[in-house]
Image (tube, helix red, strand yellow):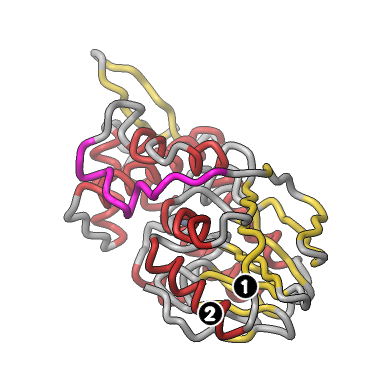
Amino acid sequence: MARAEPVQLSERVYYLPGGVNCALVLAGDGRAVVVDSGQDKDYGRALRRACEVLGVAPAAIVNTHAHADHFGGNAYLLRQFPELEVYAPPLEASIIRAPYLEPVYLFHGARPLDELTSKWLQAEASPVHHELEAGPLELCGIRFDALDTSGHAHRQLALRVDDVLLAADAFFGDAVLGKYALPFGQDIGNQRAALETVRVSGARVALPGHGDPTEDLAAAADANRAAIDAAAAAVLAAATGVGAEEVLAGACRALGVVIDDLPRYHLNFCTVAAYLGYLRDAGRVEARLESGRLRWHPA
Ligand SMILES: [Zn+2]
């Protein structure tokens, strides 16, 4: 759960450190914009308390993407502040409105296993009042630049405000990368490209969705790209004419990733599928149907 003490990143940008970082941008007139609302109502409550400490009321929420841990606090905040308006990128907005879609896509579109419908993967539903495209944006009189950082999630946006980049999961902090050698991704080519967007954003400081803020954006981009390239190499080496499940097991062995619960299994399976698609587009692997089985071969 996020702690209640807001940490200042710039004159008007604060964040709540937690398992998921949530940000508050102050308009200067008593209003604030929340950027990502965390996992659940505990995060929503912590954001409400942070607003009280800062003497502001939230007027808008921007959800950078539709993973449950980035919008699960919306419903609580909307109950407390019914005038709040929610902004999110298209496609992500559809999942925020119908969060059952996340466990559904993780289970190949079928009715998901019960283990996939806990709040870790299925947050409380929230309306989205406005769909956001990349580009300049004004909210509560604050000028933002919404940057396309798709890849970790299909239509993720990061937000730059003043000299701060609220990067969401466009990159992960060092401690997170050290813990997860197979960082979650849904489109690996775009995920790599998003790291360049972070690198050239011109921000003084960047806040990832998970981990500490950093002023060395180039080092963060490099470390994340190295992790992606290591994961791609492990997936490629495991694609020896076997099914995706064997590729997953082989890549996890090579990367030292242990999977011991069903949510983690499905998240990692989704990521490995993203890598296989990425490697196929690059001409590195072939997908062949053999006796009704999909086998992944080196190209
Ligand atoms: Zn995410």
User: 113 or 214: which is nearer to us?
Assistant: 113
Quarter that holds the N terminus: bottom left
User: Would you say residue 123 sits in the magenta stretch?
Assistant: yes
Picture disc at residue 190: none
Q: Which residue is mark 2?
A: 50
Q: Position of residue 115 (x, y in %)?
A: 20, 45
Q: Position of residue 148 (x, y in %)?
A: 69, 51
Instruction: Give the prevailing secondary structure in the magenta stretch.
Output: loop
* Secondary-structure class at tag 1: strand
Q: Position of residue 16 (x, y in %)?
A: 51, 77
Disc 1 from disc 2: Cα separation: 9 Å
Q: Which residue is mark 1?
A: 24
Identified at 58% across, 37% down, the residue is 91
Specify start and end residues of the magenta stretch as a single range: 113-127
Q: Position of residue 151 (x, y in %)?
A: 56, 48
Q: Amino acid at mark 2?
A: Ala
Tell which residue pokes out farthest to the top in this image. Answer: 291
